[in-house]
Image (cartoon, rainbow, N blue to C red):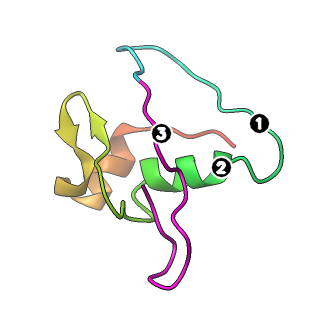
Amino acid sequence: MLKYWDDTELVLKGLSFIINPKEKIGIVGRTGAGKSTICLALCWMVEAYSGQILIDDVDISKLELGYLWNKITIIP
C-alpha cells in the first residue's frame, strides 16, 4: 500500500505481481487506474506505506536511489 501524504487515502491496495527475469512489461489502464503511481513506486519516488517492493528478492527501499535508477528503465 502507498500514500502520497500522511493525511491522504491509501492507494495501490492489495497489488501484487511477479515479473520474470528479462521480461518486459507494459502497464496500461484508464485514467486514474494507478499507472503513474506504480511507476513512481518502482522508481522509489514515493515510499510504500506498508508492504514492500522486491526486485530480484531485494527490497528496493534498502538500495541507494542512484543505484536503483541506474538498474531499471521506464519509458513513458
- Type of residue at label 1? Gly
- Relative side of 53 to 73, left or right: left
Q: Mark 2 points at which residue?
A: 34
- Do the residues under discs 2 and 3 have CB atoms within 8 angstroms? yes
The boundaries of the magenta stretch are: 1-17
- Relative side of 4 to 60, left or right: right
- Type of residue at label 2? Gly
Quarter of the rendering containing residue 66: bottom left
Magenta region, main secondary structure: loop
Residue 35: x and y in percent read 66, 45
Residue at x 53% of width, y 18% of height: 24
**Is residue 55 in the magenta section?**
no
Q: Which mark sits nearer the N-terminus, 1 or 2?
A: 1
Q: How far apart are marks 2 and 3 (CA)?
A: 10 Å
Q: Is 69 above or below relative to 65?
A: above
* Disc number lying in front (2 or 3): 3
- Do the residues under discs 3 and 1 have CB atoms within 8 angstroms? no
SS at circle 2: loop
- Type of residue at label 3? Leu
Residue 23: x and y in percent read 46, 14
- Do the residues under discs 1 and 2 have CB atoms within 8 angstroms? yes
Q: Mark 1 points at which residue?
A: 29
Q: Distance between the residues labelled 1 and 2?
A: 8 Å
Quarter of the rendering containing residue 37: bottom right
Residue 52: x and y in percent read 28, 48
SS at circle 3: loop
Q: How far apart are marks 3 and 1 (CA)?
A: 14 Å
Image quadrant in which the N terminus is located: bottom left
Q: Name the residue under label 3.
A: 15
* Disc number lying in front (3 or 1): 3
